[in-house]
Amino acid sequence: MPVTVQKQEETGVPAHAPAAPRCPHLGAQYNPFAGPHVDNPHPFFEKLRKEEPVSFNPMLNMWLVSRNDDILQVLKDTARFSNRDMLFSGTTLTEEAKAILGEGFPLAHVLLGMDPPDHTRLRRLMNRGFTAQRIAGMAPFIEKLAREMVGSFAQDGHADLVEQLAYPLPAHVILGVMGVPQEDVWKIKRWSADWQQLTFEHVPPEKQPELARGVIEFQKYCVQLIEARREEPQEDLTSYLVEVEANGEALTVHELVMAIGASFLSAGHESTTAMMANTWKLALEHGMWKRLRDNRELVPKFIEEGCRYDSVQHAMIRTALEDVEVGGIKLPAGSRLLMLYAAGSRDESLCPHSNKLDVDREKPPQHLTYGRGTHFCLGAPLARLQAQITTNILLDALEDPRMVQGQDHGTWQSIVLRQMRHLKVEWTPSTPKP
Ligand code: HEM
């Protein structure tokens, strides 16, 4: 039975992607936006790894790559596999949305969507500001925020750990890193969501102008921030980026807007929210709370094993620049590949009993949640630090919490990230110390 080839307007795929192959593929069953793969894609990913590790999905017009080795082969080969189309993976823009976006800076020139050597230069400049020292220096701020947030519900006996903690905390943290006023947090959250949706989700035409306007407002906000820091530098990452020069090169205003807006203010919180919430859900589902509470040295290991076992950043995209072969399958130049990081991280070749969440593994397997190689997540150390500090504070405050039964987590997915809207838990509050 031939696979129906979807029109490009329906798929959101750039016009230069080659036509879809005409044969049935297991990958055609994959739907990241609705149905069983949103709540639990792992049984399907396992089938893919075993039966058809490189498999075509007509809805996305992308090849699903599910085995760890195949994913690593692609990630290492930046000469033949490009990030250039990464940021045009969700919505096919209407003329009206294009016109609105045309008023601002083009969205393509962002670290995640660039290839070497342009990527190398920009990454070097950004790395130099986002140092281990700067990140470690955020620990007291993260701890203060987390204590305040957890303290606000610790005696209630119930909380929504997404709404009351995982959702607001990383946004406040990244605003702190960038030196952005904390009262602007909700505005920035909204604009970031607008940008992410246009990039990685299928947004219906009637909703696009509103989101596009959000992106433009966000860019204008970043320009004002840049101008303010040029006039009066502060001790923050924005000031560093504005002033940085290496080998006589500085960031252009376009690069600054994309770095500050997309790479830090936007990328800096949504995935962290999703990862922290999922870590706590896994701890509760797998009966790990007490063990972690009594053995704090296990907390970083548990967070990493949770990322391996169930990666919320479930995929990323590459484009083949020439005819290539992946997992024994020949793909023509222009083919788009959906690298299923969540599937690769559960690959049987990566570790024994890979379908088990096991915090006692001797050697923690290297998962793909933060990617690998050239585009390895710039913010991974900050995400890890936040998750460790906040999880420890939660463990201190909540003794024996239980997940509220029958709740709807409101889980949804873009092509690349899975998120929950709710994680409701209840517990018996401890008697406050006199
Ligand atoms: C748990 C939280 C996070 C997860 C799971 C995550 C995941 C990822 C992944 C998988 C990539 C690689 C993309 C690829 O392979 O093409 C990436 C890149 C990136 N991430 Fe994160 N991220 C997280 C937190 C953060 C934070 C907190 C920041 C900023 C402070 C950040 C900024 C970036 C940037 C700028 C890139 C692009 C790097 C490049 O292209 O060189 N991320 N992230």
Image (spheres, rainbow, N blue to C red):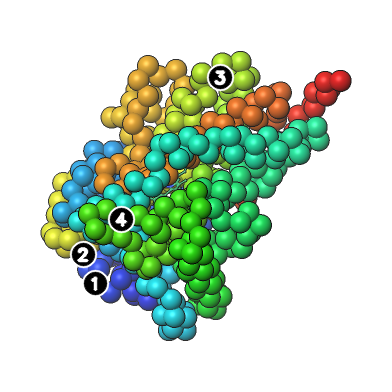
Point 37% across, 76% down: residue: 9
- First reached walking from the N terminus: tag 1 or tag 3: 1
Mark in front: 2 vs 4: 4
Identify residue for label 2: 334
Q: Can residue 384 be seen in this view?
A: no
Mark in front: 1 vs 3: 3
Point 13% across, 59% down: residue: 323
**64 or 130, nearer to the observer:** 130
The answer for how far apart the CA atoms under marks 3 and 2 are is 48 Å
- Image x and y of residue 391, in percent: 59, 31
The answer for how far apart the CA atoms under marks 4 and 1 are is 36 Å
Q: Tell whether 375 sits left or right of 190.
A: left
Identify residue for label 1: 16
- Report how many numbered discs are placed on residues in the image: 4
Dot 1: within a 10 Å radius of its alpha carbon, few (fewer than 14), some, or many (20 or more) residues? few
Amino acid type shown at disc 3: Arg
Q: Are marks 3 and 2 in contact (CB under 8 Å)?
A: no
- First reached walking from the N terminus: tag 1 or tag 2: 1
**159 or 178, nearer to the observer:** 178
- Image x and y of residue 205, in percent: 50, 77
Point 40% across, 36% down: residue: 132
- First reached walking from the N terminus: tag 2 or tag 4: 4
Identify residue for label 4: 245
Residue 316: mark: none
The answer for how far apart the CA atoms under marks 2 and 4 are is 35 Å
Q: Do the residues labelled 1 and 2 touch (CB within 8 Å)?
A: yes
Identify residue for label 3: 296
